[in-house]
Amino acid sequence: MDASELNFDIPDSGAIFAFGKNVPNRFYVKNDKIVSMDCGEGHAVMVAASGRVFGFGLNDYGQLGLGSKATQAKPAVVKQLKEDGVKAVKVACGPTHTLVLADDGIVYGYGNNSDGQITGDEADFTRPVEVEQLENVEVRDLAAGRAFSLAVSKKGELLAWGGNTEGCLGQEDPDLPGSPDPMPVHLPGRVAAVSAGSYHCACVLTDGRLYAWGETERGKLGIRNAEDQEFLFSPQPVPVPGRVQMVSCGLEHTLVLTENGRVYVCGSGESGQLGLGTGCTYAPTVKVVSGLEKLKVA
């Protein structure tokens, strides 16, 4: 479930269907099935069953990891990861940077590093580099926002690093500067999954509770009266009927999937992205997508 501007679908055949601001298109990665994918503001990255990583689209910050900043119109393999024997299992894209999770729990990154959202203090990385500050953490999930990154450890701890101008790092101190060093995000339980929009975040705990933080504009956090404050600097509970299974943050809206297969939405619906009909352009709290009530979304 992806709430970004560029979207994909993976049928059982492993073919990719892409749609968004361009003409819908279909393509295959020959002899390899796609198992994970994500997209940024203008680029897309996929992981194949073999562990190879492919990318295409805008590359002005090196966010495709190909060693250059040239736009790529067709899927191209990230050769350095392949040559280094890295077997990827998951990818997360911010608007202009990319994170890759390997099967051994190591995280690699490339693209825009203006706020230390990858590692160190270099401006950009056009080739994959290991996120060394996570070398003692076995990671199982990732998310990437505008200028920050999130990682979930196998122990269920959530870590955040990069820019903190909108409270995206989930720290209580509003004056805390951003940092390339991961900071623990304090939550009342273990984290099962995490997602990030440009300036807001949400995570699902193992007991099915949902928490959100960051920019509150347009009700994207799904918390009543949250817009009384411009930002929520620490995670706050989001009221959702039932246990949450998955969450996906878009630019100005959020989608939530519960264990009973219902989809809830909140935030801006000015482009119809909430699925609540043309009369609903804004949902400050989560609302069920009624057109899906007879379906069980998996």
Image (spheres, rainbow, N blue to C red):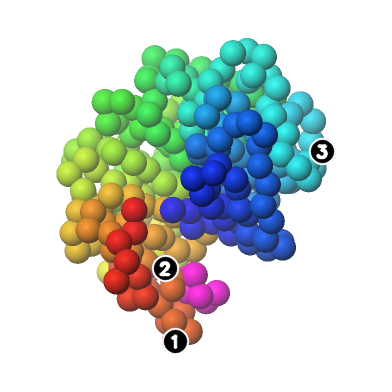
Crowding near the residue tagged with mark 2, few <14, some 14–19, many ≥20 C-alpha atoms within 10 Å = many
- Which of the 4 image quadrants contains residue 72? top right
- Write down the residue under mark 2: 267
The residue depicted at 35 percent of the width and 70 percent of the height is 292
Q: Would you place residue 45 above or below residue 210 in this image?
A: above
Seen at 32% across and 66% down, the residue is: 295
Q: Which residue is rendered at x = 72% and y = 46% of the image? A: 57
Label 1 amino acid? Gly
187 or 242: nearer the viewer: 242
Secondary structure of the residue carrying tag 2 is: strand
Q: Is residue 32 left or right of residue 186?
A: right
Query: Badge 1 local density, few (<14 within 10 Å), some, or many (20+)?
Result: few
Considering only order in the chain, which callout, 1 or 2, is on the residue closer to the N terminus?
2
Instruction: Read off the magenta span.
Output: 266-273
The residue that disc 3 covers is 70
Residue sitting nearer the eye, 79 or 32: 32
Q: Earlier in the sequence, mark 3 or mark 2?
A: 3
In the rendering, at what x and y percent does residue 62 appear? 72, 34
Q: Is residue 157 magenta?
A: no
> Which x, y percent locates residue 156?
27, 31
Left/right placement of residue 4 relative to residue 253 reads right
Does the magenta-highlighted stretch encompass residue 271?
yes
The answer to whether marks 3 and 2 mark residues whose Cβ atoms lie closer than 8 Å is no
> Residue at label 1?
279
Q: Main secondary structure of the magenta part?
A: loop
Q: How many marks?
A: 3
Q: CA distance from mark 1 to mark 3?
A: 42 Å
Mark 2 touches mark 1? (CB < 8 Å):
no
Residue 110 position in % (x across, y down): 63, 30
Q: Is residue 104 above or below residue 69?
A: above
